Amino acid sequence: MSILDAVVGVSEKQLAECDEFFHLPEVNRIATAARRREALAEFAASGTYDLTADELLIGAKLAWRNHARCVGRKHWRTLKLLDLRDARTPEAIAEGCWEHLRLASNGGALQSVISVGPLPLGDGREYRILSPQLIRYAGYRNDNGSITGDPAHVEITEMVTRLGWRGEGTRFDVLPVLISTPDVPLSWFDVPRDAVLEVPISHPEYDWFAELDLKWHAVPAVSNMDFSVGGLTFPLAPFSGWYVSTEVGARNFSDADRYDMLPTIAHKLHLDTRSERNLWRDRALVELNIAVLHSYRAAGVIMVDHHTVAKQFIDHVEREAKHGRECPTDWSWINPPMSSGLTPTFHRYYDPPDLDIRPNFIGRVGNGCPVQG
């Protein structure tokens, strides 16, 4: 640690990241050399500095473009910013979250949105959203060991229940959002109904599909990743885009440790489930994903299929190459969980993920793409 690190709490690495940020071509178009020197001087003297709203938005767009686990990066230029840096109470942050969801939902014509909250205080205390996403479904543990709802969220459901929250006990109860601030370590807030756009799942050919009473929310808003830009780290920065259909159909509804719907659907399709050689899971999986895509389209809610998004990603990679930029990519994340070999993303190599590239979204344990989930 240098003397500078100890005195003002800013490292030489952070100062270098600040300098590099203002030298980026996209930032250089709006920030003069004088502005760069001003930011560096303030950062070195005080340990922090304020980004303008324009600088923050460009930084967020570049963080999306740089994120190795996101297959939807072609649309990085479309990102909208909701500046919540002045929201310093749990109530103000919660209201900002609801505004984010309404703006992102946009009546089904989903918009990519990032909300950016306050920086940590000088003593290190932070503003955070503790929930993994702004919209998640509860999971209730039954006496017989079964789970009603989403098994992925049993622990958080039990925690908020101990805090006083009471769900209705259905498979799709929206969990409250957990918020932490320097003055109030833990608060929970119910998500207003008008901020949650949901899609009931039906099938274009099988009427019985609607009787399964499945639904899913429209906006995947990842809320527990850090946004690192210009040497600064914003721990409160929920980010949302739209779903790839397989995230809902081939993961959330199909994983054995999530809603595990494939055996039920196979039974309704009268498939022989006694042998894996019958590929009954695969046949049920295809029909489930057909239903998901059909339902989102019928509801007028944006969703992209895995074939289309794979082609879009290849277009993005090629466009980046034309601009002389690398495209760090985590191969295991950008390929879909079904029919991977039928997509163009599967059959090629990519620039390896770069953990040091900035701006970026920095995942805590278990986090991945900020556009899906």
Image: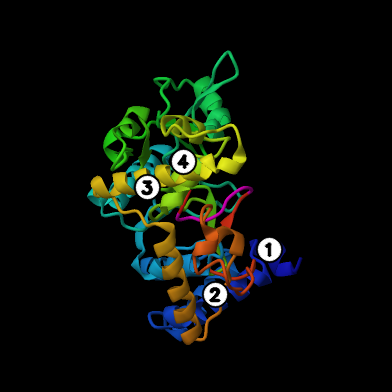
Task: Residue at 38% x, 67% y: name it.
Answer: 75
- How far, Cα to Cα, is label 2 from label 4? 35 Å
Front-lying residue, 2 or 154: 154
Q: Is residue 99 visible?
A: no
Q: Which residue is labeled 1 in the image?
A: 7
Tag 1's secondary structure?
A: helix
Quarter-wise, where is residue 90 in the image?
Answer: top left
Q: Is residue 247 visible?
A: yes
Residue 194, above or below 60: above
Counting residues from the N terminus, which is met first, the one under dot 2 or under dot 1? 1
Tag 3's secondary structure?
A: helix
Q: Which residue is labeled 2 in the image?
A: 327
Magenta segment: 365-371
Residue 194 located left or right of residue 9? left
The overriding secondary structure of the stretch rendered in magenta is: loop
Amino acid at dot 3: Ile
